[in-house]
Image: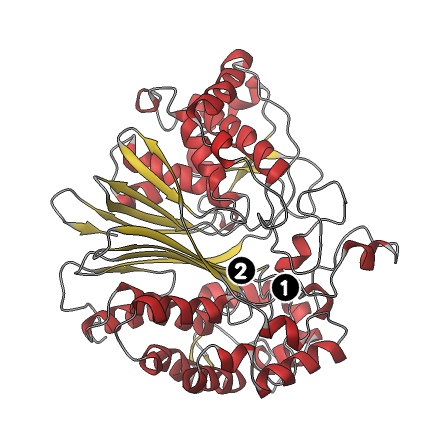
Amino acid sequence: MQNIMPKVYGAMVATPHYLASSVGAAVLRQGGNAFDAAVAISAALAVVYPHMTGLGGDAFFLSYHADTKQFEGYNGSGRSAKLASADRYTSRGMSGIPQRGAESAITVPGMVDAWWSVWSRYGKLPWAELLAPAIAYAEKGFPVSRHLRGWIEKDEGLIRAHPPLAKLYVTEDGELIGEGERLAQPELAATLRLVQSGGRDAFYASDFTARMAEAIEQDGGLLRETDFREHAGEWVTPLSVSYRGYELYQMPPNSQGFSLLLMMNMLENTELARIPRDSADFYHLAAEAVKKAFRERDAVLTDPDFNAIPMGRLLSKDFARGLWDEIAEAWPAPAPFLSSAMGQDTAYAAVVDEEGNAVSFIQSLYFDFGAAYVPGDTGVILQNRGSFFSLDPSSPNVLEPRKRSFHTLMPAMVARGGKPCLLYGTQGGEGQPQTQLSVVTGVLDYGLTIQEAIGLPRWIYGRTWGEDSDTLKLESRCGEAAVERLRAMGHQVEVLDAWDGRTGQSQGIAIGEDGVISG
């Protein structure tokens, strides 16, 4: 195999797919910076990781610019259609928004706009060069990974039911495309070429847009051409809290990132490093902090343009202390809490360049293969993110026109002395803040390398689709002793296989005080 490592030593790329990693490394070799590499990686993932992400989804970018020494975020999430409202569904006797099909694709995809905005502000290389690798993989194809093949098999029914997907993933003899076989996506390649030559407007304000919107309308969807033309993501100021001498950064709402900051504020009230990482006490503390944070998250999280969110109060140390006292007073009994099941299919990546720029970014279609719907011949799988809106008028996340949903995506960063020292993120809906807690405490409290922290035994508290109640799910690697003690404490424990997919995968980059980078 050709050596794809960059000929630079102060740079690193971490992604969930080797082809995307090679694309990022090549961009850095060619003189691009972390922002160029992030855009190129994101576009490549939209092709080679089609079950988790794509042009029809959203993306969030959390970045540090070495020249300005500023942390910034770009919110690339889309708003609901102007025609979308809770009444549209409740008046038909529906209790929820459809999870698949054209009717579930009710939010504008924000990812292409995010690429353009990040590149326009900070990129160095020509725009066309950054999309070229993704186009090549779409046109010429790439080998189907074991991961992708597993999801194709899981979603066989959805794929066979929708001709544009069946055309890609079902062979001429009627079999599902196999691991190692070449997957080409010519219609997606054509769309990417339009974006390569015409920029973001080729996707949001062109004849292509009109054609895509017409197909959506014909198929019963709500998005219209004006929804695409009026879309705009936004640059935002990240949220941050201090933790044991570090600064933790997350995206502001509509991202759920603040829930992790709230958990860390709670855990700062104890010397966590003195609690063995493989003990029942650790998993109990983690689960109880998750419950408190999710209770507060679910009470307020929505599009901040529609409802004010008291972030100053929620992220104050005094507020976290009050929640911590609730945990301590109930010890060792677990608190009850019923959470909502969420999609967990995501792609996270991180890049650091020689100049000191850093980009932590994440993208998703929400469910695996999103809405399982492609409008016309665009090759674009649309996200079903809008299916998570509530139809309950009392919910802060109730569906309203032109609104951004409660969003699970949350790229993360940690700084020391004003400079990034850790970039990290993970898959999973309700699992994202929990796996991030595992990774960041592994590095900051337990002194592990980023690889060791990512490899720690995982847990996830909550409820997955089809379940009636919350459970504390632990990998078997957590140990039988911890499981039995947690059950004795009153937790409803479910033991998962080691490295179970429900605990997500994670990527990260750590930068030592001596400048040495590991990932």
Q: Quadrant of residue 477?
A: top left
Q: Quadrant of residue 269?
A: top left
Disc 1 secondary structure class: loop
Residue in the picture at 61% in, 28% down: 492
Q: Is residue 457 visible?
A: no
The amino acid sitting under disc 1 is: Thr
**Which of the two labelled residues, at mark 1 and mark 2, occupies the earlier sequence position?**
2
The amino acid sitting under disc 2 is: Ser
150 left or right of 447?
right
Residue in the picture at 37% in, 43% down: 249
Instruction: Decide: is 318 above or below 248.
Output: above
Closer to the camera in the image, 415 or 186: 415
- All told, the count of numbered labels is 2
Circle 2 residue: 77
Residue 358 lies, in percent from the top left, at 27, 56
Q: Residue furthest left?
A: 514
Residue in the picture at 60% in, 46% down: 302
Instruction: Decide: is 396 above or below 203.
Output: above
Residue at mark 1 to residue at mark 2: CA–CA distance: 9 Å
Q: Is residue 392 visible?
A: yes
Residue 354 lies, in percent from the top left, at 17, 61
Closer to the camera in the image, 45 or 201: 201
Circle 1 residue: 107
Q: Are marks 1 and 2 in contact (CB under 8 Å)?
A: yes
Residue in the picture at 65% in, 42% down: 340
